[in-house]
Image (tube, grey):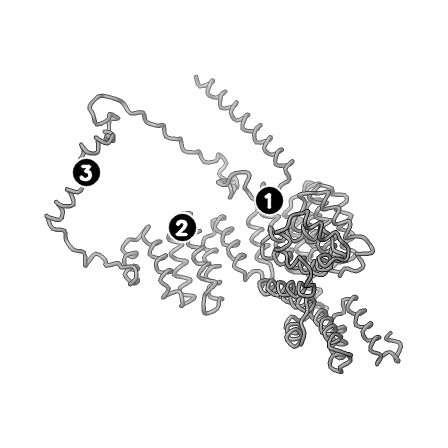
Amino acid sequence: MNDAPHTAEHVPSRHLLAQLHYHLEEYEVAAGIYEALLTEGKFRDEHEKTELQTNYAAACSAIDAQRTQSIVRSADEKNADLLYNAATAQLEVQEYAAALQTLKQAESLCAKAYPTSRLRSFQDACSRSDTELRSLLDVKGSPERLFFNDVAIIWVQTAYVHYAMHNEEDATALLNLVLRYRPSSAVTLAVASINWTAIQRHRDFFDTHRKLKSAQNPAVNNRLTSRQRLLVRYNTAMLLLHTGNFNAFKRQVELIANEYPDSDLTHSLKLALAVRESKKKRQPDEKTLTEYLKNYQQSVRAQKEHARNPSVGKLLPLIAAQIFLENGDLEHAIESLSSAPEEIRKKPCTLMTLATWKVQLGDVKGAKQLLTEFAGAAAKGGTVVKPILFWAVQFLTARGLYTDAADVIRDMQSALPVLQNDKEARALLALCLSHYDMQAARTCMETIPEAGFTGTQTEKKLLASSIAEATSQQPSRKHIEALGYHRISADGHDGNNNGAKVKRSRRRPMRRPPKNADARLDPERWIPMSHRSYIKDLPERRKRELKRLRAIEQEQKRHEAEKRKAAAH
C-alpha cells in the first residue's frame, strides 16, 4: 500500500493501513494516521467518528496514557470500547484504582447497549446459580449471550487489575466465569488462559497445560501481541520447571531466547536454567549467579551504548536475590538486590527487605544508614517515612535493640525536620529510652503536652491519713485465704503449717550453643519448618522427603543419646 500513491487520499485504504500498522505493533504510525483522519474530518457521521476515536485511543494506550485520556475526554459519545482503552492506558502507568473505576464504567455502558439482557454486571452473574446461567448463556443470539461476548474482555482486564492489586480471589472468580462459559472471541479466551495460568501456577498441571495449549493454537497465536505470545511461552516454561521436566524446560528456554533475546523474562529463565545445570555439575550457585549477572550487566550497557531502549534491567536482580536467599546466602542476596534499578531500590518494600537482611547478618549500622538515607531523600511531607519509621522501631525493639531504635528515630528526625514535632515519633522515642535511660524518657515525655505527664517535681506527698485509707482498702490475708489462695513459703511449704510439700516444675535446661561456632546459623531457625521461606514453596513430594530425612536424623540422635546415657551408668 505504501508503493501505491493513488491510495494516499483513499480513506478506506488509510483505515486499512492504520489497522496493519496497529497489528504490527507500530502504534505511533497507526496513531498518526487516525489523528490525521480525525483532523481532516474524514468520517461520514458521528458513529464513524466514535469508531475513529476508539481506534485512535487503542493505538495511543500503549504509548501515551495522557494522550489517551485527552482523546476519551474530547469524545462526544463514549462507549465501552473507548473506556476500555482508557483503562488499558492507566494500567500501563500502574494506576490500578483508576483503571478499576474506568472498567466498571465500561461494564455499565456495555449493559446499556443490551437493555433486554437480564445479566447486567459481574455481581449479577455471581448471584445466579450455574443452572440459571446455563439457561441464559447457552441460547445462541440471546441478549445475555451477546452481552457476555462483549463484556468478557472487560472482565478479563478487571481480573488482571485485581491480580496486580494482590486480590487473587476476585481475579480467579472473574476468570473462572469467563473460561467456563467461553465467549465467542478466541483472543479473549487466550488472554484469560494466560492470566489464569499466572494465578494458578502449577497447582493443577493438566488444567493449566490444557489452557496454555489452547492459547498456542496458530489461529489464535497470530492474533496475540508479541508480549502476550512471550507470556504464553514463559508460563509454559515455568510450568515445566515446577513439574521437574528439565529437558523440556531447556528446549522451551532455547525457543524463547531465539524469539525474544532481550526480554527480561528470557534472562530470568536462562538464569534459572544456569542454576539447575550448575547443581547437576555440583558447582556452587554463587559462582554461576555472579558470572551470569556480570554478563547480564554487560549486555545492558551494550544496549544503552547503541542508543536502544533495553527492556531488561528490572526482574533479574530480584530473581538472583531470591535464589541467594533460598541458599541461605544473605550477603550475596543483599548485593544482588542493591544492584537493582533505582526505581526499585527507592520502593519502601525494598528498603524494608534490605534492612531486615542487614540486621539478620548483624550489620545494624548499615541498616540504620539505609533508613536515614531514605528519610533524607523523601519528600517534605514525610507521608511514606512515618510508616517506615514505625516499622523499623517495631522491628528493632522486637529484637531487644532499644538503643539502635532510639538512634534510628533521632537520625530520621534530623534528616526529616517534620518528624521532630510529631507527637507519635516522640512517644516512640520515649518508649525506647525507658528501657535503658528512664531520666531521658521522662524528659522526652514532658515535651508532649497531650500525654498529661507531670514529672517528679509536682508530685504531691501522701498524708498519713491517705496512706491508712489506702491500706484499709486492701484485702487482708485471712480474706485471701478464705477464697482458697495460700502463700507459698521459701522452703516449699504452704502457709497452713501442715507440712505439705508443693511440687515444683523442673526448669527446662538451656539449649546449648552449636559446637561449631563458625557454622552459619539459620536466620529463620525460630520459624516453624513448614513456614520457612526455603521450605514453604517446595513441591509436596520434596517436603515429604525432607520430613522423612529429619525424622531419621532425630531418631539417630535419640539412639546416640541413649547410648551415652547407658555408658555413663
Position of 554 compared to 422: left or right? right
Task: Let me know if residue 312 appears in the view.
Answer: yes
Q: Amino acid at mark 1?
A: Asn
**Residue lying at 75% horizontally and 61% vertically, measured from the top left:** 225
**Disc number for residue 91:** none
The residue identified by callout 2 is 397
Percent position of residue 475, x then y: 19, 38
Q: Amino acid at mark 3?
A: Pro
**From the viewer's perspective, is the residue at label 1 or at label 3 nearer?**
3
Vertical position of residue 390 compared to residue 533: above or below: below
Above or below for 537 versus 366: above
- Circle 1 sits on which residue? 327
Disc 3 residue crowd, few under 14, some 14–19, many 20+, Cα 10 Å: few
Q: Which residue is mark 3?
A: 475
Q: Residues within 10 Å of mark 2 (few under 14, many from 20)?
A: some
Q: Earlier in the sequence, mark 1 or mark 3?
A: 1
